[in-house]
Each structure stands twice: as C-alpha cells, then as structure tokens.
Image: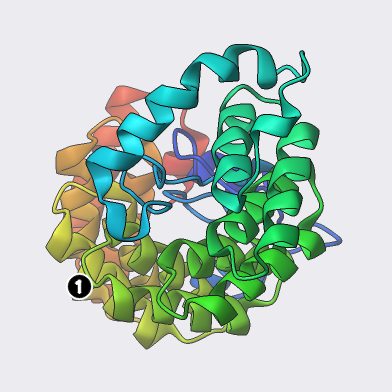
Amino acid sequence: MSWENLAEIFDGIEVLQTYSEDGSAQNNRTGAVLGGGAALAAGVALGAASLPLAVPLLVASGVFAGAKGEETVKNAAKGIGFLFGEVARGIGGVLDVFKSDEDFCYRGVERLQNGYYEEAIEDFTQAMTINPKCIDAYFFRGCIRSDMGDYQGAISDYTQTIQLDSDYTDAYRNRAHILAAQGNYKRAALDLTQCISLDPNDADIYFMRGKMCLELNDYQSAVADYTKVIEMNSGCVEAYFIRGCIYLDLENYKKAVEDFILVIKINPEDINTYFHLIDAYIGLGDYSNAVVYLNYLIQSNPKSTDAYFK
C-alpha cells in the first residue's frame, strides 16, 4: 500500500503523518493501516510539533492556595491582577512586589496566557529557586518547554513534577505525548496506564494508549482500549474504524463487519470504510453482500477503478 493510498484511507481524520523511513508498509492490514509507525487515526495527535500546551486552570481551582481555599486565591488574583497588564509584557519597576513562589507562579501563568513564554519560564524558574518543591512551577515550565520544542527539558520538568506529586495526572499525560512522539511507546503506555489508574473516566487516554498498543503489536490490548473508548463515547467513529481494522487483520471478519457498518452509519460518506467492509465480507465468504456494496460504490462513482477491480 502506498503512502498516497494510506492518506486516502484516513481522509477526513486527523492523522500523525509519520509513515516509515522509506514509505513502505507492512504486509498485514493493521500493519499497513495502523501499526509499524504508520499514520494513526487521531483523537490525540502524537506528533511532537502538534502537542497541545496542556495547562489546566490550576490557579482558579486553588492550587496555590494551600489551606486558604479557592475564593481566597481568586480574590488574591484580583488583588494583584491590576499589575498583570504591564508585568506580563515586562514593563515597569514592579518586580520587587513579587516576594514568594506564589507571586512568581501567578505572574508566570499570566505571561504564559499572553504568549510571553520566555518571560514565563523566568518566573517559574524563580518560583522554583524560592521553593524547590513548587510543583506547579515545574509542570507549567514543562508545558512551555514542550510547546517551544525543548522536549527533553519538558520531560525533565514533568518527571520532577511526578517525583514531587505522584498523583499529578496531567504530568503523566503530557510526558506520554512526548515519549510517544519520540517512539518510546512502551514508556508512553506506562504513563498512560498511570493516568488511567488516577482518572479512569477519560476516554482520550484509552484512545491514546490503544495507539501505543498498536505500535507495540499488542492488538488484543488495543482492542480492549478502543472498546473502552466506545463504551464511554458511542459516537467515536475513529475508535470503531480502528477496532474494525484490527479485527480485519486478526481475521475476525464478523466483528470487523459490525464495526465498519457502525462507522458507515455514523459517517456514510466515508468511502474507504466501504472498501474495508467489503474486504471483511470477502473474508467471511459472503460475496453477495460484498457485491451489493461494490455496486453501491460504482453507482456513487462510475469511475471507481478500485471498485470494478475488486
């Protein structure tokens, strides 16, 4: 299967376009469509350059408040908020106002939100200098480093975050993104498994771990993860499609037919799924249904040489 054909298979689905060094594909269907470094159906992109700057709203939820509570933090933020308009741009002699790690973290977040990454890094680093256990400063700096392309620096910061707080779910998630983009699928899967143990209700994490399982050729575990995604989000067409491809590769044609039919019900315009469905019917020896769908494809596109050939 050529890269061009592979791209067509994922038409309309966000993909990681890292096929293989020479553009080749493996012989089996899942290897050609999903595994071995091929493009993966998205949900969460794995390309390092497209990693999100995943900064949860920690300030608003009282992360820096300690025992003071959420409202106190919000009021404190309002109290120094008048500074941020100028301070975020590095203007004015107000640095001496910031005395604590919390002060620098607040300003770092403000600068981060305004896109002043270098200045935000300075603030988070200053917060760490004042308080080496300032967990959120490490996490925020890791987010910025990741977004700026300093992936090893980001991994270091996320690792430090986790060492200080082993329940910091977002640090595991963000580190897994980078590890996956670097091809370290086993370690990424371990981080995602930790995320699931901390937050078992996040379908995106199961989806991403399913990708790691595919890269590790652990198809049964991938099926389990995509099944979990479907249980949590019955409208996730990508999960049905990928699971159908895995079933097709495992020669579980009946299950593949079921998944591809569900994909078509959700997205009837996806012509490529029809071809996979037809392959599954052929695998079952059900040529009558295969011909029915081939006739449909030909009626829809009389110039479809693939449909005539099949």
The answer to whether 228 is drawn above or below residue 59 in the figure is below
Q: Which residue is mark 1?
A: 255
Percent from the top left, x then y, of residue 276? 36, 56
Who's the residue at 51% across and 36% down the image? 305
Percent from the top left, x then y, of residue 110? 57, 29
Who's the residue at 54% across and 48% down the image? 102
Who's the residue at 64% across and 28% down the image? 111
Determine which quarter of the picture holds residue 128. Answer: bottom right
Q: In the visual, does 275 lie left or right of 123?
A: left
Badge 1 amino acid: Lys
The answer to whether 67 is drawn above or below residue 298 in the figure is below
**From the image, which quarter does the N terminus lie in?**
bottom right
Colouring used for the render = rainbow
Percent from the top left, x then y, of residue 25? 69, 65
Depth check: give the residue in front, 155 or 43: 155
Depth check: give the residue in front, 15 or 306: 15
Can residue 48 be seen here? The reply is no
The answer to whether 124 is drawn above or below residue 27 in the figure is above
Depth check: give the residue in front, 96 or 147: 96
Outermost residue on the right side: it is 22
